[in-house]
Structures are given as structure tokens and as C-alpha cells.
Amino acid sequence: MMGLIRKQFAPFGVYAFFYFLNIIQFYVHAHFVMPAAKMKTIQALWRLPLLIAIEVLIYDCINLGITNFLYRNGYLIFKNAPDFSLDSYLSTSYRGVYFILFASAYYYILRYFEERKRAEEKEKERLLVIIENQRIHADLIKSQHAHLKAQINPHFLFNILNFIYTSTRKTAPDAAEAILALSEMMRYSIEEARKANTPLIGELEQVENLIKLHKIKSHKQLYISLEYDAEVEEVEIIPLLMMTLAENMFKHGDLLQEAHPAYLRLTYREGLLEVETNNLISKNQMHPSHHIGLDNVKKRLKAAYGTHATLQTAVVEEHFIVSMEINLAAVEQKYALKHC
């Protein structure tokens, strides 16, 4: 274009040399100078002019210096010999600013497409959140319907269990006691599981019922004990943790060895609830233990208490030990600070 306008064409080496410098300046300005100016901040008011001035000065020095060197050594041919006059600096600076303007436009075009891409991604995330909320809402409605249906069935079931208990109390007292214990455990699971926190005494009574049921079922002496302090009775935690720990002992433990009695022990001191189970590992398990129940306990503890609750397991001399701690004092303090 310049050759056509001027009606005079320079050698190819001249074009290649100068446009190579211009290309370098273009991308340096777009990808380094503009980001360094911090365009979205007030600092750009003085950073950008200063950086452009430095950029033009460096461009002029490199351009004129290399041009003079290549001309003197015969690598480039010019109609007029290059010099370091004011006109040469102004002409070179003009070309430098010319390509700086193009590079600035290129920078803003890139930023526009990046911002539009980010906006599209945010909109996509917003739509995904809306879809997920709708799915959760639909699941909640299904759960509510299922809950309404389930309210009828347990009522009927408890009436039947009470009838069977009354009918068998005199003829089969062991069966009647098993039915009564089962009824109380089911009633507790249905009614208390809906609550955020329940007193431990209620669940410990159901653990006693669970022990009673297994003793009646096995027709053998089971060596397992439930031990807790009086302070534990009024402590409130999320429900069904103790039931899960006790069921895990019955499912995977050997409770028939008098020399290796199992126990579920609870202590409460200065806001710290400590729970420990210890049982001999059964060697006659039908299926290997995958600790699904314990994994569920861990997930529930994390959801309810975060870092203020821990559950650890260990195997010591063929005994499986579960240690659980809940720092209820820290939980209460965190709740109080949150609602101050």
C-alpha cells in the first residue's frame, strides 16, 4: 500500500525489517504494556502515558540504531542515508504510536471477548443453579408426599405390634418383650429422626432395647455393656449416632467371648462428648465389612459439627475400636457468635 501511494517500492529486506519491529512492538504493547498499566484502576491515568513514552523511546532507539548499523554494513539499501535528526525521531515515533493505537484496539477487542465469555459462563452457572434448585424442590415435594404416606403406615404397624404384644405377653413372654422393644425402637427412629437434636437418654434407652432384642434372638449370653455417666443423659446431639455404632458392633463383632466383652462407653466433661466402642472382631462374618454405617456417621458429623467432631477407628489385638468426639462447647460458642 505504501509503495502504491508513494509510487516507489523499497527492497523486500526493508519491509521485512521494519514490519518485524512493528509486529514485535504490536504484541508487546497489547500483551505486556496494557496489562501492566492496570487499565481498570485509577493508576492507569499515569501508568499508561509513562509506559507508552518509555515504549516509544525504546522503539526509536532500536529502530534508528539497527537501521544505521545495517545501512553502514550494506545489509539494507535506502534512498537517503538514515540519520539521528529530530525529523527521523519524529517520523519513527509517529510509526511507533501508529502501531500502538492498533495494539490498544486489539487489546480492548480481546478483553471484550474475554468478558463476554465470562458473562456467558456466569449465566450458564446461574442457569445450572436454577435447574439444581428446581430439582431439589421437586425431590423435596416427593419426600413430603412420601412422608405423608408413611405417617399412615407406621400408625397401623404400631397398632398391630401392640395387639401382638398383648396377645403373646402371657403365652410367650420373650416374644412379647422382643415385640415391645422393636416397637419402641421403630417409634423412636420415626419420631426422633426428624429432629435436629435429641437428648441422648432417649437414644441410649433404644440401645438397651437393641441389646435386649439381640439377646432374645441369639438365645445366648452376649457380653456387651452400655456405660455412661449421669451428665450424658441430658446432652443433645443429632439422632441415631449411638444406634448406628451399636448396630455396627452386633453386625461385625464377636460378643460371645466372656474374656473379651464389648462395650459402648460415653463420657461428658466440660462440653466435650467422648464415645468409644470396643469389640472383638468376628471371624465368622458372612460378608466383609465395608464400614458403610461408620462412613455415614462421619458424613453426618461433618455436616452437623464440621471440624468440631471427629470419628476414628483402629484395630488393636483383634479388637475393633471406634473413638468419636464432639466438642459441643465449641459448637455452641460458634452458634452464639454467629447470631450475636
Image: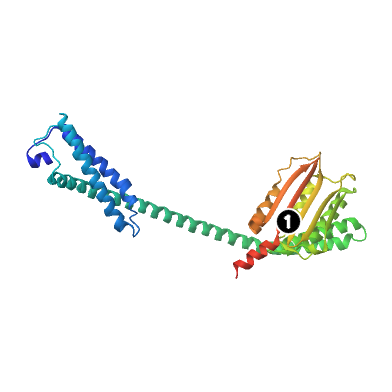
Residue at 73% x, 53% y: name it.
324
| Residue 157 visible, this orientation | no
Work out which residue is located at the far top of the displayed protein and give it: 74
Nearer to the camera, 62 or 110: 62
Locate residue 16: give its quadrant. Answer: top left
Q: How is the image coloured?
A: rainbow
Of helix, strand and loop, which one carries label 1?
helix
- Image position of 191 (left or right of 99): right
Residue at 25% x, 44% y: name it.
58
Q: Position of residue 118 (x, y in %)?
A: 39, 53
Screen quadrant of the N terminus: top left
Residue at 93% x, 58% y: name it.
171
**Residue wearing tag 1:** 241
Residue at 12% x, 46% y: name it.
87
Q: Position of residue 279 (x, y in %)?
A: 81, 46
Q: Amino acid at mark 1?
A: Leu
Work out which residue is located at the far left of the displayed protein and give it: 7
Q: Position of residue 230 (x, y in %)?
A: 82, 63
| Residue 322 visible, this orientation | yes
Q: Position of residue 121 (x, y in %)?
A: 42, 52
> Crowdedness of circle 1 by 10 Å Cα count: few (<14), some, many (20+)?
some
